[in-house]
Image: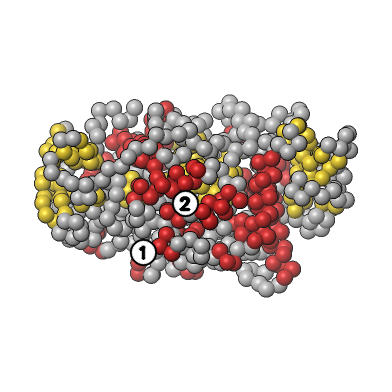
Amino acid sequence: MPTTGIPPLGVTRTPDGTRFAVWSHNAARVDLCLFDKTGSKELHRLPLRRNGDVHSLALSDVPLGTRYGLRADGIYSPEHGLWFDPSKLLVDPYAVELDRPFRHDLRLTIHGEETADLVPKAIVTEFRPVKPKRPLFQPGGLIYEIAVKPFTVLHPDVPEKKRGTVAALAEPVVIEHLTRLGVSAVELMPVVAWIDERHLPPLGLHNGWGYNPIAPMALDPSLAPGGIKELRRTVEALHGAGIGVILDLVFNHSGESDRHGTTLSMRGIDNLTYYRHAIDQPGELINDTGCGNTIACDHPVVQALILDSLRHFVRAAGVDGFRFDLASILGRDMSGFRRNAALLQAMATDPVLSDRVLIAEPWDTGPGGYQLGNFPDVFLEWNDRARDDIRRYWRGDRHTIGAFATALAGSSDTFSRWGETSTRSLNFIAAHDGFTMIDLVSYACKHNEANGEGNRDGHDENHSWNNGVEGPTEDPELLTARRNDVMALIGTLFASRGTIMLTAGDEGGHSQHGNNNAYAQDNRITWLDWGQLDQQMIDRTAALSAMRRRFRVFAETTFFTGRDDVAWLRLDGRAMTVEDWEHPATDNLIMMLTTEDEMQKRFTRLAVVINRSHAPHPLQLPPSLDGEWRDALTGAALGALAPARSVNFLVEVF
């Protein structure tokens, strides 16, 4: 185990007092700084005693609520990767609660500048451990991705003081919406304490996504003013409604950024240990993340910090699992990505974590960083290849029908390479990173001017289309066309085999005005305007979700065999031929499934009829032996035409 030989770090409460401990190999001295209740006045500065690389001190008179920080002294030589500066107050990497959010200031980057007035203070606290239950979410369910503040900050029926916080997610009106959509688990975008990138404050912008963390265990006070107890109460409320909770965590980089960035925590405690550096240039940070630094996930101390963070959220809040941002970093060492890396194996076998939901974003920006399909078999993986194949099909690209069908069926070409018989694909069409669903069909190009980077940021190729007009329009026909395209995309998502993810707001047509990199838009660009959401689209999404739960075939993860479980047909009811698959402009097909029907309590046939053409197409299903074909959502009888730009579900009713 990566934690072998490392004693407990952070704050440990015992009947005899309170122990503070931090790990640093290269520091000459580490001091504990105790502050008054406001966190503004330093009362005591106490040297920690060194035992090997662990610096610790036990005190008998430290009450709960005490504010504290650290200072580390030693050699200051950035060209050698050493950043020790006792003028910098440092946040304990094991802090579990902070007294204020981080804010960027130039003094955080200047050697010799005192920063105690700028840096949040950790709070000595304790919590009642929960007894973790088996995760409510199981592969095959519906994950609903939520950015906490944007999701509720404008919700008129959430109490004003709770809007934009974790506590808002426990409100009955929010749970009612999630239940209506049939959500299996919410995936909360980062809620741990983060700092703005240094270029944002001069632009008057603020990081609203949280993918720039400093303290991996401490919730951001602006999102969870009640700390870990607030998260625990919210998890309990969601669990009471049958909804799991997955935390999106960032262990690939930190907000301390590149060598021009801030000294706030790990950099000041032991930069050479916590971050990966070039072998021949120890002062040069490796940047496999595109964010300025790369956390050294192959170091035992870093592995211990990550595993302890995960255990903390399970024990203190009872969360169901985790999604890991740029997760290829977790399996990297100096030789590259390894599927059997110690940290990945530890997550899969740890007694506290082994039954949790584990989700990988299976790439980073470094050499050999794209690892879709290569994670251990306990990980679900974000499948961007299926995302793009589905988008390209609906955009009308040629030669896409085969890749589209493969994506619908669970991407066996990707997820069987290690001898697996089940898909680990997490299918999505839109996520926080990129266009929203409605923008995907309203903009052919990104429009990120509001980010202050000259529209250079964000992906250039989104496989999007605008239906003839770029951006906003009042043309009713065009608005209808865009709405139909969104519902076709969502219908495709709900028809895909395995686990699926829908991003909050996409079910109601939430737009970010063409911004496909809205991390810096903590404003109405990302905030959901609940009064403007399209209720008809929400109704249709809810109906699709109910249909998906009715037919088990979609949530199952084993690969189709093609013998008696799936058949691919043309819209005239005949089997797809090689010529149909290879034709550059095949616009439609039927995925004929054999599935258990929860409503009829028997096995039946279900036809998923897909027509991307801009015109209706004659439809002829195989004859029903003892029943008739009806719309699985509405109960209407089978029509003679497959509607244009649509996904329809027709069930054989007996």
Q: Is residue 382 above or below residue 354?
A: below
Does residue 510 appear left or right of residue 595 in this picture?
left
Count of numbered circles on the image:
2
Q: Residues within 10 Å of mark 2 (few under 14, many from 20)?
A: many
Q: Indicate the amino acid at tag 1.
A: His
Query: Of label 2 and label 1, which has the lower sequence position?
Result: 2
Task: Look at the numbered disc 1 and give the secondary structure of its residue.
Answer: loop
Does residue 508 appear left or right of residue 205 in this picture?
right
Disc sitting over residue 170 in the figure = 2
Image position, residue 100 (x, y; %): 29, 58
> Of residues 55 and 258, which is closer to you in this image?
55
> Of residues 420 and 41, which is closer to you in this image?
41
Q: CA distance from mark 2 to mark 1?
A: 35 Å
Q: Residue at x 50, y 31 (%)?
A: 378
Disc sitting over residue 255 in the figure = none
Q: Residue at x 80, y 55 (%)?
A: 643
Image position, residue 117 (x, y; %): 20, 61
Q: Mark 1 highlights which residue?
A: 199
Q: Residue at x 76, y 28 (%)?
A: 563
Image position, residue 215 (x, y; %): 31, 49
Q: Is residue 68 above or below residue 451?
A: above
Is residue 576 visible to us here? Answer: no
Is residue 169 visible to us here? Answer: yes
Q: Indicate the amino acid at tag 2.
A: Ala
Task: Look at the numbered disc 2 and give the secondary structure of its residue.
Answer: helix
**Number of the front mark, 2 or 1:** 2
